[in-house]
Image (spheres, grey):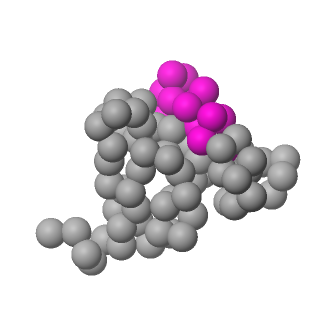
Amino acid sequence: MPVTTAAMPRAAASWTLVRRGGTPTAAPSRLDAAAILAGQAIEFTGAADGMTIATEDVRHLGRFPGSAARPWATIP
């Protein structure tokens, strides 16, 4: 699915939350791919629905509120 303009504010909000929580996923001046993916997933599913992101980067993607990151191999 393409990244949408609507997902970017959600990505920025996710980026801000993990930064303020002391668990950044990229350098201080960067809005990284993990934040963009989390923002896109939240925009697609709705913030209240939650979602699971299949990834090999569970450590970073699992930091974003409203998302669950799981390794590809563990998802049936």
Name the side, left or right, on which 26 lies relative to 38: right
Residue lying furthest left in this view?
76
Q: Nearer the viewer, residue 3 or 61?
A: 61
Q: Is residue 9 magenta?
A: yes
- Image location of residue 75, percent across then percent down: 22, 69
Name the side, left or right, on which 67 lies relative to 27: left
The residue located at (60%, 27%) in the rendering is 9
Q: Is residue 71 above or below residue 15?
A: below
The residue located at (31%, 71%) in the rendering is 72
Quarter placement of the N terminus: top left
- Image location of residue 56, percent across then percent down: 44, 72
Q: Quadrant of residue 24?
A: bottom right
The residue located at (55%, 58%) in the rendering is 63
Q: Nearer the viewer, residue 50 or 28?
A: 50
Q: Is residue 17 above or below residue 56?
A: above
Q: Is residue 20 above or below residue 26?
A: above
- Image location of residue 68, percent across then percent down: 38, 57
Q: Is residue 26 magenta?
A: no
Q: Nearer the viewer, residue 65 or 28?
A: 65
Residues rendered magenta in the picture: 2-15
Residue lying furthest right in this view?
29
- Image location of residue 35, percent across then percent down: 59, 47
Is residue 9 at all visible to an observer of this figure?
yes
Quarter placement of the C terminus: bottom left
Q: Quadrant of residue 69?
A: bottom left
